[in-house]
Structures are given as structure tokens and as C-alpha cells.
Image: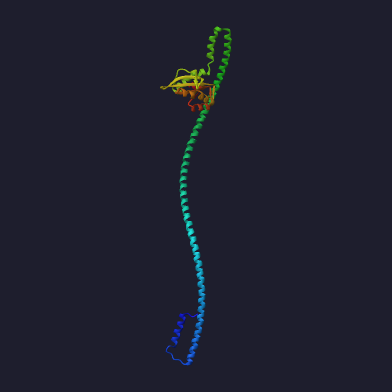
Amino acid sequence: MITAELYEFIVRVVEEKVKDIKVTREEFDQLRRTVEKGLAELAKRVDELAAAQAETQRQIEKLAAAQVATEKRLDQLAAAQAATERRLEELAKRVDELAAAQAATERRLEELAKRVDQLAAAQAATERRLEELAKRVDELAAAQAATERRLEELAKRVDELAAAQAATQRQVEKLAAAVDALRIQVGRLSETVGFTLEDLAKDLLPYWLRGRLGVEVESLERKIIELEGEEVEVDLYAWGVLGDKKVLVVGEVKSRIYEDDVNAFYRKVVAPLSAKMGVEIIGILFGFAIHPRAETRARELGMHAVTAYKARV
């Protein structure tokens, strides 16, 4: 295919060749042949150019298709990039949240570390206290051993007194049957030999009350009192003075005192008597032997557990 531009170019060439030239027939034929040959070559060249143009068009079409594919791929890449950016934004937000959580965790760890230090200090103080208590327990154990030895001695003495009392009682009975006139004298002798634990408490506790508690009492006596509609007999009863106020002393006497004895005396006597009288009640349990738990429970209830050897102090 000859384009308009190519055609005009050929015409200009021909015109330039024949312009102002006069030729013969032979020269004209030769010129025609030359032109025809040139035209044939030109046509061949034009065909080659057309083929090249077609090939170029095909290449352009391929390039256009490739361009479309490239643009499609670019669109996909752009979408992927947008998705990536959104993901990065989400990750950045998550990182900020994790950073805040990490900061909170670090603050919590600092608080826990501080608490651990405090607990360690408290533990050290507790261990020191336990060492002191262990030492005190050892001292109390030694004192308890001494107390038990003293109690054994007292128990032995009581047994001896009981045997003497039994022998005396038998002797008194014999003498009473034989001589009425000697009954009073023998009775006085029996009272002297038969010195009971309650008599011992009445004799020793006023001194103990004065020396240990600062309470002055004249004497202690057995007394029946009415509590919550019932008559209750107490072994020791006396009004006393502590400083400038009146107090009431009540006590129970038993050879061996246990925790249950303390609870029962507080429940039956001390608590209702305190509610009834409206004054300070000093509750005392007096005996030869007192269980350690009984002493502890008495202190918890605001009472006093006193043994005969302590009352002599």
C-alpha cells in the first residue's frame, strides 16, 4: 500500500528528473524502463515497509495487550498495597495497644516487686518474732517443768496430808465415841490438820490480789448468789477496792483446772454477774495444777488462773 506521502515523494522525484530536459524516444524508453524498475523496486520496498508496518502493528497490539495486563497487574498491586497499608495501620494500632499493655504490665511488676520487698521484710520480722517466741517457749517449758516438779511435791504432800487426815479422822471418830467431853478439842485439831485447798485460797489470794492487781479485799467467803433466776454457789466471793472504785472478786477452787473449767465458770458466773452488777468483775480460778490452755483461755476472757505456789509469791 502506497501512502499519500510516499506518492507525493515519487512524483516530486520524477518531476525533478524530467524538468527542463528534452529527451529522445530512445532516451524516453530508457527513462521509462528506469522509472518502471525504480517503481518496481519502490513497490517492493513499499511491500516490505507494509509488512514491517503490519509486524509493527502486531507488536503494538501485543504491547497494548501487555500494557492492559500490566495495568491490571498494577491495579492488583495497588489493591494489595492498599490492603497492606490497612494491615500496617491495624498492626501499628495493635503495637500501640501492646505497648500500653506492656507499660501497664511493667507498672504492675514494679508494684509486685515493691510488695515482694514488703513481704520479705514482714517475713524477716516474723522470723525474728518466731525466734523470740521459740526462746520464750523454751523458757516456759523450763518453768513448766519446774512447776510440774513442784506440783508433784505438792501432790505428794497432799497425799501425806490426806493420809494424815484419814488417820486423824479415824482417831477422832474413836475419841468422839469414847469421850464426848473431848469432841470439841478433837474437832479443833481436825480443822487444823484438815486444811483444805479452799481454805488455802482464802488465806493466800488476798495477798496475791494486793500484790499482783492492786486490789484490796478483807476476806473471801463461799456464797450463794442468784443469777438468771437460779441459785449459784461460788467458792470465793468478796467486794474489794481497786484505786478509787469498787470491784467484785469471784472465784472457783479445783485441784486441777482445764480449759473447759475456765469456759464454764465464765459462762455461768462471770458473764451474767458482770451484766447484773454493772461493776468490774475479777474472776479467779485457783488450784494445784492448771493446764496451759486453761491459762491462755483465762487471759483471753480477762480472768486469772492462779496456782497455790504462785499465790505465795
Q: Residue at horizontal 50%, vertical 67%?
A: 68
Q: Residue 7's x, y, as percent? A: 46, 82
Q: Residue 107's x, y, as percent? A: 45, 46
Pick whichever, 302 or 80, lies toward us. Answer: 80
Q: Is residue 12 above or below residue 85?
A: below
Q: Is residue 112 above or below residue 16?
A: above
Q: Residue 168's x, y, as percent? A: 57, 13
User: Would you say 155 lies left or right of 22 here?
Assistant: right
Q: Residue at horizontal 46%, vertical 47%?
A: 104
Colour scheme employed for the rendering of this structure: rainbow
Q: Residue at horizontal 49%, vertical 63%?
A: 75
Pick whichever, 298 or 131, lies toward us. Answer: 298
Q: Quadrant of residue 15?
A: bottom left
Q: Quadrant of residue 211?
A: top left
Q: Residue 282's x, y, as percent? A: 47, 23
Exactly how many numbered labels are in the figure? 0
